[in-house]
Amino acid sequence: MGNTTGGALGAAADAAAAALATTRMPTTRNESFRFTDLSPLVGAPIVAHDKFDADAKQISVLAQVERLSLEESRGATAVLVNGRFDADLSDLSAVPAGVFVGPLSSAPDAARASVGAQSAARGGPFATLNTATAEDCLVVHVPRGRVVEVPVHVLCLSAVAEQGVAAVSPRVAVVVEDGGMAELVEEFAPLECGRAGVAGSYFVNSVAEVALGEGASLSHRYVETDGADATHVRATLVEQAEKSLYSLTEVRLGGRLSRHDLGIAQLGESTRTEMGHFVLVGKDQLHDLHSSLQLDHPEGQADQLHKCIVAHAEGRGVFDGNVQVNRLAQRTDAGQLSRNLLLVPKATVNVKPNLQIVADDVVCTHGCAVSDLDDDQVFYFLSRGIDEATARASLVYSFGMEVVGRIRQEALRERLEAATRESLDACASLS
């Protein structure tokens, strides 16, 4: 699966590098990658990204970081440039005493011990590749009983290389101990500096491992607006102890190909999991979501809402969602809903919602809808003097905002709203 250059995760990196020797790149012959064609990566001139130019950083990246910073996260912003934590660009002055946000090399032992465990057990080939090649790992550690009021904003910026496809391996590990509470905002974007006018693509292979203690809570925002030629592969792995809450809001708009493998395990009773996903697919884009939630204990709760818009005939959306309610997970309340909007003929979405129930005392529902806009809704606008183009644009926009609106950070939400409008307008002009 290609050569590795050694990673920062010690023994875990060594084990992952050894595993790669017998690991093959997934193809469309693999069931879980049946609709995710990774062939553009096969044989591509993948290169490790070179060191970042310090002068360019001081001039243009500082301006970009300032522009993308969130008012709600002032003093709690960690910046990763090409997968590496950059202390000069980061501002962690508002992180409370006792709470750690920083590189793995300085992390508390309680957090370091868990890094790499979930990806080794159930991460898949790309998570293994990340473990072997990651040059750094950002650690967020919240001690027992601590409540972090300021959302931690992790800004991941990636640049193209002079030649070939630049590969970066950002990694985040979050440990919230018993009774702790935090909010994490991960934002992926292209680096806007340095080699202006240089065409090229980059490959982001990111991993996030989350471990929640008893009664802990994490609100997690994952936003991807990579460059038009980027490939973004992501693994999010979560373990929830008894009575914990994990809430994920995901918005993906950028890149030529993106795939998110989300794996969540409820490890105790009375545990809650909330997932909201919005993906917008334009020309030549593929956005894929594979999610897996496993419930093994009584009185668990789960809610998943997946919304996808395919706005161009040469775009494809993929959703494979699996919720598994095992025999001991009695009195579970779980719901899964996938809604997909195809705006043009030949637009494609492949949807496979899957709710497996072995327990017999549960309240579980799931549903799936694939359609164009509702004619009655369009007629409602027309009957009030609004032209059809405006009516359709308003309905399409509001479809995605149900998920985007869950993001509390105003500047980030406005950026996503503007990017959604821009992408929809671009697709409409090409139709």
Image (tube, rainbow, N blue to C red):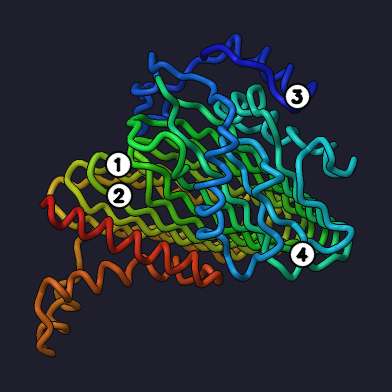
For the residues labelled 4 and 1, the Cα–Cα distance comes to: 38 Å
Q: Quadrant of residue 192?
A: top left
| Residue 268, image quadrant | bottom right
First reached walking from the N terminus: tag 2 or tag 3: 3
Residue type (three-letter) at the residue carrying disc 3: Ala
Badge 1 marks a residue whose secondary structure is loop
Q: Earlier in the sequence, mark 3 or mark 1?
A: 3
Mark 2, Cα crowd under 10 Å, few <14 / some 14-19 / many 20+, is many
Residue 81 or 193: which is nearer the viewer?
193
For this view, does 13 lie left or right of residue 53? right
Numbered label attached to residue 315: none
Query: Cβ–Cβ below 8 Å for labels 2 and 1?
Result: yes
The image shows residue 405, relative to residue 109, as above or below, that is below
| Element assignment for label 3 | helix
First in sequence: mark 3 vs mark 4? 3
Asked whether the viewer can see residue 300, the reply is no
* Tag 2 residue: 281
Q: Return the mark for residue 285.
A: 1
Label ID, residue 94: 4
Residue name at image x 42 percent, y 50 percent = 225
